[in-house]
Amino acid sequence: MKSSKNPGHPDFAFFKVYPAIAASLDLSYSEQHDCLSEGVTVVVTKRKRGNGGIVRDIVRNPISYLLALPAILYTFIFGYATLPYLLMAFQKFSYDTTYFWQNELIGFKNFEFFFLSNNALRVTWNTIRLNFLFIVFGHAMAVVLAVAMNELKSRWFLRTSQSMFLFPYFLSWVIVSYVVYNIFSSQYGVANQLLEMVGMQPKNWYGDAGAWTSILTVMRIWKDAGLLAVIFLAAIIGIDNELFEAARIDGANRWQQIKSITLPLMMPTVLIMMLLAIGKIFYGDFAMMYSIIRDNGLLLPTTDVIDTYVYRALRLSGDPSQAMAVGIYQAATGFILVYSVNRFIRRKFPEGALF
């Protein structure tokens, strides 16, 4: 990769002040003086990596590939070997046939049950809206936690903080649902008791659909932000300490170091995690939604997502072909979103692109 930039371009000042950061990004820059125009052109060049095939890399790193083997087998069996079953989405499924490919082909009839229903637009919007809030606020909170934990000097306090933030991730949504119920129960909930203490009227939380967008977002952040923060903290720890030493010698304070070194160098990891999350933005967290909301019809206008809607529909129809049709819709839209966002990031911030 080769590009020319004017000396006034902000990248020039950035690499000029932080040459070690340019080196860590596998970039180098040089100046070319134009005698005729008496100007200076900066050339930023991507260093070429060494050539080598996959076989040579396996021979060099056999232990690494052996560790990756279970994940490769899992992906192959459940990700690729099951692809022929996508045909079920275009068939009239019958439990009497021996093999699934013997079922009658009916075209796109199985897609009609979802797309022609009155609720398709509502549950699709709820799925995207809730996942968007989970991704944006969850990753923002994880970045703040990771940066804050990196600034801690006490190792004991750091380990304790990491354990406390990580612990909710290992709780099942069933347990979390009872925690939520104890907080927002109408009669004995902590939330209503606090409202009464400050002189306010208790509220029927399980009858107010509008409040549950915020409640679900907070619960999702509380449960998952700790794991993301640990991943981001690992990315921060991987930053070369010489960068911070050089910044301190130049007189940079802690906030300037965070703004100019920590945040830029952890952004590739943050963007990749966000891209992976965007790939599932059309998938509602069924365990979360159904454990907390269940079949409460009063809350469905704002909390009913594609997965819970399909589950309730299939509980009545019992047709797996319709579930496969909705699964293809979720996978196709998720792939299009990931490809589009990755292409946008690749243009604006190449180091954070997934592919």
Image (cartoon, rainbow, N blue to C red):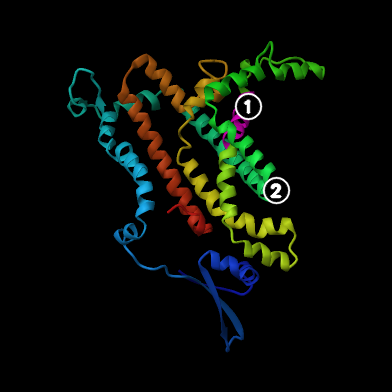
Determine the CA span between mark 2 and mark 1.
30 Å
Span shown in magenta: 211-224
- The amino acid sitting under disc 1 is Ile
The answer to whether residue 221 is magenta is yes
Mark 2: secondary structure = loop
Q: Give the vertical position of 150 relative to 328 (above or below).
A: below
Badge 1 local density, few (<14 within 10 Å), some, or many (20+)? few
Q: Residue at x 34, y 54 (%)?
A: 62
Q: For this view, does 323 lie left or right of residue 20?
A: left
The kind of residue on which mark 2 rests is Leu
Q: Residue furthest top?
A: 187
Sort mark 2 into few (<14), some (14-19) or many (20+) by Cα contacts within 10 Å: few
Q: In the rendering, at what x and y percent does residue 267 appear?
A: 57, 53
Q: Which residue is mark 2?
A: 152
Query: On screen, 103 above or below 265?
Result: above
Please provide percent x and percent y for residue 315: 39, 16
Quarter of the image that includes the N terminus:
bottom left
Name the residue rendered at 61%, 29% in the picture: 219
* Left/right of residue 294 with respect to residue 205 in the rendered view: left
Residue beneath label 1, please? 215
Q: Which residue shows up at 56% across the image and 22% down it?
A: 175
> What is the residue that sits farthest to the bottom in this orientation?
35
The answer to whether one can see residue 291 in this image is yes
